[in-house]
Image (cartoon, grey):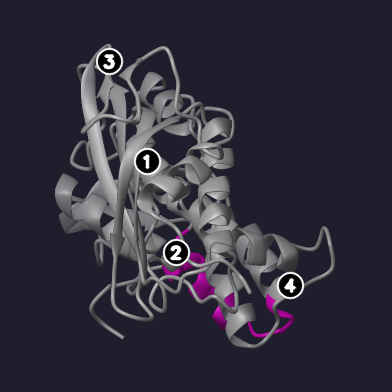
Amino acid sequence: MALTLADLSENDLLPRLWEHLPTRGRDVLVGPGDDAAVVHSPGAVVVTTDTMVRGADWLDEWSTGWQVGAKAVAQNLADVTAMGGRCTSMVLTLVADAGTPVEWVEELAAGVGERATEAGIVVTGGDLSSAPVGTRMVSITALGSVGDSPVLRSGARPGDQLAVSGPLGRSAVGLSLLQAGRTGADEGSWAAECLEHHRAPRADADAGETAARAGATAMLDVSDGLGRDGTRLATASGVGLLLDGDALAADVQRAAEALGGTDDRAAWEAVLTGGEEHCLLASFPASATVPAGWRVIGRCVGAVDAPAPVSLDGRAVEGGWDHFRA
């Protein structure tokens, strides 16, 4: 019979987790084992946290423990780098019922550990807590370093270029495929990439620092959709964002191909309102050279010169993920 959390004490379980996690680094003065970790930061400290709940943020039928761990890292890493920072350490919390398989917990730790190691992040501690039957929740708090001038959402100016650091629509397409019962796809296909990106997205640890050095005036993580997150940037900066349909056409074409249909409406919806992409959206001065890996998808204008905070071809782009709305 499979081992569950009820079969182990906390002291028995923790060593099984630490063997999967990177716990030592040059900035870690005190690692796991005491009441709290002690880390050194060469500059200002960026702090963020993100929580995932089984049934709301993942389904066991679709995602493994490893994939849940990978996604948890991406969510937090993207928020740190969106400030123009460098993520340096994380702490991991697991809340689970006693019947949770130990194998799943170790998979979770392995997913966190592998993706943290890829990004040069150490895991310095965390917390374990029991919960009622059926409850499973994973949370990460991430810390990072940033220069004297973090990149905020409020710095965009009329005339700035608007750019993203990666493709759009992948996670939304992956979710649509899973909801349609398509849990697998041909290796190397766009559908396979979308499924993988929804289950275990990657965030670029360097994108925010690179953008900050290139003069980014405002920036944020695309976690709730281009329309919703773009509206947040536009509102904070007092500008309007005019999207370029031609610049988004390749994203829409790939989304339509993965969805296997000829109706582009679902593909446009995935690109414009799909969440959990975890690339970055940023504005740059008109005279700036957008960094490698970034691409221009529109421009900023004065709020009074735009039909909506975010628009495409004169029409408002609305919608996206909201935690408390269906």
The amino acid beneath tag 2 is Leu
Mark 3 Cα-neighbour bin, 10 Å: few <14, some 14–19, many ≥20 = few
Is label 2 in a helix, a strand or a loop?
A: helix
Q: Quadrant location of residue 86?
A: top left
CA separation in Å, label 4 and label 3? 47 Å
Residue shown at 50% from the left, 67% from the top: 4
Q: Are marks 4 and 2 in contact (CB under 8 Å)?
A: no
SS label for mark 1:
strand
- In the depicted structure, whether residue 90 falls above or below residue 67: above
User: As shown in the figure, which amino acid type bears the numbered disc 1?
Assistant: Ala
* CB-based contact (under 8 Å), mark 4 and mark 3: no
Q: Position of residue 143 (x, y in %)?
A: 29, 32
| Residue 225 visible in the picture | yes
Q: In the picture, which quadrant includes the C terminus?
A: bottom left
Query: Which mark's residue is nearer the viewer, 4 or 3?
Result: 3
Q: Nearer the viewer, residue 226 or 59?
A: 59
Mark 4 or mark 1: whose residue is earlier in sequence: 4
- Marks 4 and 1 in Cβ contact (< 8 Å): no
Range shown magenta: 259-276
Any magenta on residue 7?
no
**Apparent side of residue 35 relative to residue 120 in the rendered image (left or right):** left
Q: Is residue 260 magenta?
A: yes
In this figure, which residue is indicated by the disc labeled 2?
5
Q: Is residue 44 left or right of residue 4?
A: left
